[in-house]
Amino acid sequence: MLSAMEIQARLEQILLRVEKPGRYVGGELNQVIKPWESVKTRVALVFPDLYDIGLPNLGLAILYDILNKQKDVLAERAYAPWVDMETLLRENEIPLYALESKQPLAAFDIIGFSLPYETLYTNTLNILDLSSIPLKAVERQKSHPLIIAGGHAAFNPEPMADFMDAFVIGEAEDVILEIVHAHQQWKAAHLQKEKLLMALSKISGVYVPSFYRPVYKLDGTISHIERRNDESGSLPVTKRIVPRLPLPPTNFIVPNIDVVHNRVAIEIMRGCTRGCRFCHAGMITRPVRERPVAEIVASIETALRNTGYEEIALLSLSSSDYSQITELVSAVSERFSSQHLTISLPSLRIDTVSVDLLEKLKGRRSGGFTLAPEAATDRMRNTINKPISAEQLLETAREIYRRGWTNLKLYFMIGHPTETLEDVQAIADLCKAVLAEGRKQIGRRANLHAGVSTFVPKPHTPFQWVPCDEMENIEAKQVLLRKTMTGPGLKLTWTDPRDTQLEAWLSRGDRRIGEVIYRAWQLGAKFDAWQDQFRFEAWQYAFLQAGLDPAFYTYRHRTLDEVFPWDHINIGVKKQYLIEEFRRSEAGVLRADCRENCYACGILPVFTEMRRAFPGRAWKCPEVRSPSRKTILETAAS
Amino acid sequence: MIRIQIYYSKGGAFRYTGNLDVHKAWERIFRRANLSLAYSQGFHPQPRLNQANPLPLGITGRNELIEVWINNNQINHEEIRSTLEKSLPPGITINAIEEVPLNAPSPQTRVIAADYVAEISPAIAAVQLKDRIQTLLQSESLIRERRGKKYDLRPLVYNLELENSIRQAGNHRIFMRLAAGQQATGRPDEVLTALGLDPFSAYIERTGIVFRE
Ligand code: SF4
């Protein structure tokens, strides 16, 4: 293994030959460097996409902060090198290294991958390969780092099960330290790797795939999951959550080069009660927990002082639903609006209140205004459970243009279950009507950008049973949009149907898809989310080599009693609730926001004790009042 | 409002930061220091902050100059220096700081040349290197192409020489003074290429900017 100094020396010979070498050197303000020998556990946090995208990632920033606060732990970072850098790394036999110490990744105790979306799977393999670490978990020895992954995509861990030693399901803030602790004990005891995995499998929220084996039926669906070792943790693995959002990080790393988001990002709320049926995040991040206004404002203040950033982003899945949104916006604008800062508040509801909020937040109307109606006919809105009337959208748009925004961006999705060409035509008509409103208000300065993506049914959602819309349908729908949505001031963007297919294969894949990912990577697939790198043929060929039918994962109709590859992962929301929602969707029946009326989705029974210990308004689920059975028994005994 | 000129060095990881991003880094230094920069007028107000002469990515700077306008009359430049120093990112250090009259000519217009030192691996013999330098200096013109445009590099090279004493590490050190400023700028990497050297494996530092008085 090359030493950090040797890596550094070789790097100096190649860095000026690549585009944006600042991606590969670290050394930014607020990075944490600890002496390598001074700690017991060294963790590399890897975002398997470009530095420019990974650096601003809030999830990794949180873990970096938590881990480096531990005296006996150090955490460093690594990202996927762009193709030019990869070539030079391989030519010069430089292993992938962590930015802080330049130590090779293989020298770390634990490597944690962030997997927020599925198109990072091939990059993950590539990073292991660039680190000379065997890709498959079974081929790794005790001397290799423990390879773990977490993030939203990990809620269906099966496609990556062959490559990971363990997955973190859910929120990692607490569980990451438990993993480090288990690793420390194991390392001190000089035991076999199996013992470490055993200990990990007993931590709540940790899934060790090698202890379980899916058994398939003849038709290719899953019969059941076999537990291979009686001493391992039992199934299902229930996701971890934190009862209260821990204090947000304020010591963000400030890059020396431009990245996608140069900002102080702060999560104002986690979870969402809206219940849009297509939304993966909305289902897996329940329950809703809010952060107090005072804490948000104080954290922004500290973070600005620590970073000097010129932008603040208040993040959540649905900003308008934050219960004290008006107070928050007042406090933030009062405190920070005079400092030439850009303040963004994404994910706003479609109503004029949102326009008031953003107007208050931004002194000047820089940038555009973004809204996500998702569908344009009432039938589709009832199907996906996102009821926003055309009148409401038009009224909101009118206000947006009238108050000085010239660019409005609307997000729609095509390919929803049962969608027809009429529903798609309605998107075009609605956009034209919106732009016409804009023209009435501010004339030719009004612009409209429609971002029309394609729906992919996701695990753990009420749509996990539905087939994907066929490729020909998607293409016909996109042709329709392209033909009708022309004219000055109107811009349309859409998703390549092949990208959608890949996303569909990977998100509802089973463990056998691992072989497809492996072969696709061997055939050169990586940076799959990048148009200029995406190799669709490699994926098709990989399916062929693995002897699997891609249509099995995309176009098949799933019955309600099918055992899904991710059924042993418990997100808290009951499968029965998802079935109910699926049926209501077919019947076109809406379900109101659950913060007004709890529909017993399953979260509370799973997290009863937690809710009982943390009563109050921070959670949007009802309080648990009845004493627990344990307490009753104890009282009875005394 | 006061106008301040800061002489600073840029090294470490900032070697790989281009000029626009260095500009951004300075804006953030001032934000962290809680020193409010003056902003330009207009629809897109920009902080008033000028660099005397852009430094290409890959080159470190020993004594760069940036000029700023600060919305504060109460503070003196020594206080500014000590506040800024607490806010610097790794790789940037302040050499000197001085207040200049608000109506002084801008430093961009006063730049005439810049000095560089390039460290080259000892793989090539000193005599050979001296020869190449002589040939370059004796040539009348040196037509090169950059971004699809032809230009003559020779008149932009004011001085070029090899340091005589060999250093401990064994690297050669080439000194150059090249034209800089608003008319035409000579790039040290282009000079190295013209000498048949690989600019990407050289370590180039700008040691100073030369101003017209
Ligand atoms: S338990 Fe009730 S309130 Fe909480 S997320 Fe589920 S349905 Fe909503």
Image (cartoon, grey):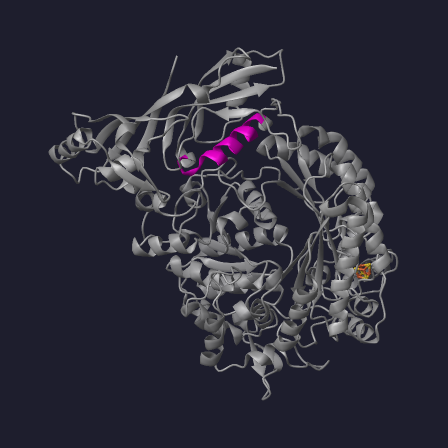
Query: Quadrant location of residue B111?
Result: top left
Q: Give the image location of residue B203, x and y in percent.
A: 30, 35
Note whether A475 is above or below A31 in the view shown: below
Please report the residue visible at 30 percent of the width from the left and 46 percent of the height from the top. A10
Q: In this view, does B170 lie to the left or right of A275?
A: left
Q: What stretch is highlighted in magenta?
A: B15-30
**Which of A229 and A112 lies nearest the eye of the viewer?**
A112
Q: Give the image location of residue A433, x and y in percent.
A: 79, 57
Count of numbered tags: 0
Please report the residue visible at 62 percent of the width from the left and 25 percent of the height from the top. B39
Q: Give the image location of residue B145, x and y in percent.
A: 31, 42
Query: Mainly helix, strand or loop, the magenta region?
Result: helix
Q: Is residue A135 left or right of residue A498?
A: left
Please report the residue visible at 80 percent of the width from the left and 62 percent of the height from the top. A386
Please report the residue visible at 83 percent of the width from the left and 54 percent of the height from the top. A394
Q: Kindly tell me whether residue A572 is visible in this rendering.
A: yes
**Which of A454 and A506 lies nearest the eye of the viewer?**
A454
Query: Quadrant location of residue A235?
Result: bottom right
Note whether A607 is above or below A577 in the view shown: above
Q: Kindly tell me whether residue A593 is visible in this rendering.
A: no
Note whether B112 is above or below A126 in the view shown: above
**Which of B131 and A339 lies nearest the eye of the viewer?**
B131
Residue at the far bottom in the pictured view: A218
Q: Give the image location of residue A577, x and y in percent.
A: 79, 70
